Image: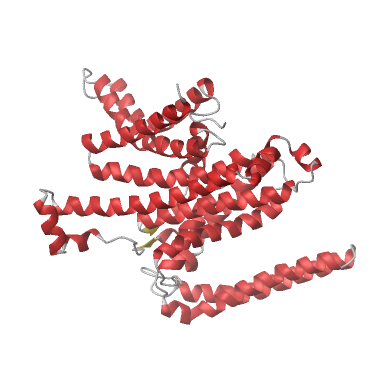
Amino acid sequence: MNETLKNTGLFAVVAALIAITGFSQSWNSALLILNMGLISAIMALGVNLQWGFAGLFNVGVMGFVALGGLAAVLISMEPVGDAWAAGGVGVLLGLVLGAATITAAVLVTTRMAPGRVRTATVLAVLIGGFILYRSVFDPSVEAIEDINPANTGYLGGLGLPVLLAWPVGGLLAAGAAWVIGKTALGLRSDYLAIATLGIAEIIIAVLKNEDWLSRGVKNVIGLPRPVPFEVDLQNDPGFVENVTDLGLDPVTASSIFVKLNYSILFAVVLVILLVMAQLALKSPWGRMMRAIRDNEVAAEAMGKDVTARHLQIFILGSAICGIAGAMMTTLDGQLTPGTYQPLRFTFLVWVMVIVGGSGNNFGAVLGGFLIWFLWVQVEPMGLFLMETMTAGMADGNWLKEHLMDSAAHMRLLTMGLILLLVLRFSPRGLIPEK
């Protein structure tokens, strides 16, 4: 079969699955799957850039997605004036003192001759700086978190349009990736995986515990939206009249209209990133990255700075994941640090890349849509299957109860089964790298 026809057919199958969901369940459900599929495809694109282009095994995707979500809060939420007055300056001063302590320790380490004097000086700088930092930072944090903790208890954001949070989310993730890459990219691939996973968990721990920054597990709700609110549309006489003329319920129509607006915004971002990734793949830079991936020693012998190129692509891939994280938080309308789990935001994204086709941007996008659809729909399918299989069994039968309880695990079973089948029959993915 012609390759282009085959690939088009695969995307058509996924589109048909989403359309069937719309006809058989509801268009609200279908559009929600579409929107999350678009975001998942962007995440998969970022991981594919790191793994498919450069062979970097990053299992800290969750951390970069969470930083993108934090950016949505920092950019779009209104500043909490009382919190800033109570301790905003102190928190900023404390962070400056912490950064200055680390900088001073690095300078002492690099400029003094090795020996006991240098060791003692570094310890003195670190201990003294830490004490000074905590003496300024802790009282300010307590003052901020005491300001109406039920509703605020944090500094808030800048009150800017939420769409600005998407590129800022990418920049925030890129900055974290630079720090991580400078320390971890010299490690072997398995150690790099451990390091990135650990750092991602640290990022999540910070978001959960630093209430002054993100309200922690109390969550930030009511984020501004780039599209209208459903209730505003339902109170708009013009909108109500138009949808009523079409024979539609205004409540349902408003929800569908909002989701369609999100779909357009997300699709624009995905297309831009996909075009840029394709141009990069076919450029001399892309060929260099694949050469480094295939044989680092040979590429280094040709004068390529392998570590610098790895850092470059690690930052780019992480930035894309940060953009996706900001988009997802915008769609949810809230930041919930407790929901960031490795299973959803790392493992599942890797399954998307592997199933779609590592090294192929279109494969990563296909994997994002397909795996997300299955992740959402497999559990209700499993419940229907179990109900059908046990229809003839009496209520209370131990086997029936066991099978019905097992329906909740169909997601994990299906993901593992799909991964095994793809690795067995199409080890390079559904749309393999050329």
Relative vertical location of residue 57 with respect to residue 87 in this rendering, above or below: above
Quadrant in which the C terminus appears: top right
Q: Position of residue 287 (x, y in %)?
A: 65, 41
- Residue drawn at 33 percent across, 36 percent down: 15
Q: Is residue 59 visible?
A: no
Q: Position of residue 88 (x, y in %)?
A: 51, 77
Quadrant in which the N terminus appears: top left
Q: Position of residue 254 (x, y in %)?
A: 21, 54
Instruction: Tell me: 415 left or right of 297.
Output: left
- Residue drawn at 55 percent across, 41 percent down: 48
Residue 93 placement: quadrant: bottom right
Q: Is residue 127 visible?
A: yes
Relative vertical location of residue 1 with respect to residue 300 in this rendering, above or below: above
117 vs 26, nearest the viewer = 26
Instruction: Tell me: 112 left or right of 386.
Output: right
Instruction: Tell me: 234 left or right of 401.
Output: left
141 vs 269, nearest the viewer = 269
Q: Position of residue 22 (x, y in %)?
A: 24, 38
